Structure formats: C-alpha cells, structure tokens
Amino acid sequence: MINKISRNEQRRKRHKRTRRKVFGSGEMPRLVVYRSNRHLYAQVIDDISGNTLASSNTLQKRFKENMDEKMSNKDMAGLVGRLVAEDAMKVDVKRVVFDRGGNKYHGLIAALADSARKAGLEL
C-alpha cells in the first residue's frame, strides 16, 4: 500500500526547509505570508527583536474599504500586498526577505509578492 503525504504535510516540510535559510534582520525584515482556507495574511517581521513592523490581511476594515465587489481572489491578494508594502514604507522598510510560508510561488502568493514589488518593496 502506498502512503501518500498530505498537501499540508508537504507544505510544512517546504516551510521548514525555507525557514532554515530565510531570516529577517532589522535592515532586511521578513515578509511572511500565511494562507488559510478563506483569508490571506501578510506580516513584515524583524526576527532579531521579534517585532511585527507591518501587517495586512483580508479581515481588516481598511482592506474592506478598498475592496471592490467584483474583485477576484488574485486581485484581493494584490491588495493585501499593496497595503502591507505601504505600511512597511511608513516604518522605513524598503527591502525584505520573502517567506512564502511553504506555499508554492504561484497564484495568490505570487500576486501578493508582485503587488508588494510594484508598491515599492524590494523582495
């Protein structure tokens, strides 16, 4: 009998492998993306001090004010990326290390990263 590893377990393995290499400092914090079944969260974290410098997600009031009724999921991910980039720029963060959280760089994750780049962050 073949034992197939679940997708979530594969994601956890990818996340552990990436976290060994990706570390956020004060000069270059880490942009973390977490994706649940319904929502998308992004945070800019300084790992040395353990502080969250900026954050954005699909539950925020500010997100809902900028959201349009007919937005696709990719457009919503792009909006989250733009908002987190704007918040990061307010605290003088211009360069970040991208931590995709074990997710594949595809779809919503790629849309968030591209939007953050367009808003001025260097990934």
Image (cartoon, rainbow, N blue to C red):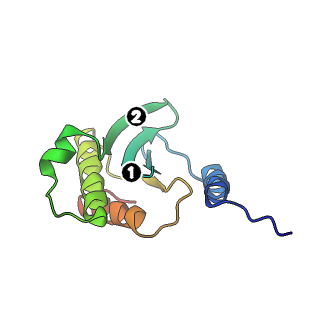
Label 1 or label 2, whichever comes before in sequence order: 1
**Residue 75 appears at what percent x and percent y?**
25, 64
- The answer to whether 108 is drawn above or below residue 57 in the figure is below
Residue 26 visible in the picture: no
- The answer to whether 74 is drawn above or below residue 63 in the figure is below
Query: In the current view of this chain or complex, which residue is farthest to the front?
Result: 1
Q: Quadrant of the N terminus?
A: bottom right
Other-residue count near label 2 (Cα within 10 Å), few / some / many at <14 / 14–19 / ≥20: some
- The residue singled out by tag 1 in the image is 38
- The residue singled out by tag 2 in the image is 52
Please indicate whether residue 10 sits to the left or right of residue 54 in the image: right
Number of marks drawn: 2
**Residue 103 appears at what percent x and percent y?**
52, 60
Task: Report, in whole angstroms, how far the alpha carbon at label 1 lies from the one at label 2.
Answer: 23 Å
Three-letter amino acid code at the position of disc 1: Arg
**Residue 41 appears at what percent x and percent y?**
38, 46
Q: Quadrant of residue 10?
A: bottom right
Secondary element at tag 1: loop
Residue 47 visible in the picture: yes
Secondary element at tag 2: strand
Please indicate whether residue 68 sits to the left or right of residue 93 in the image: left
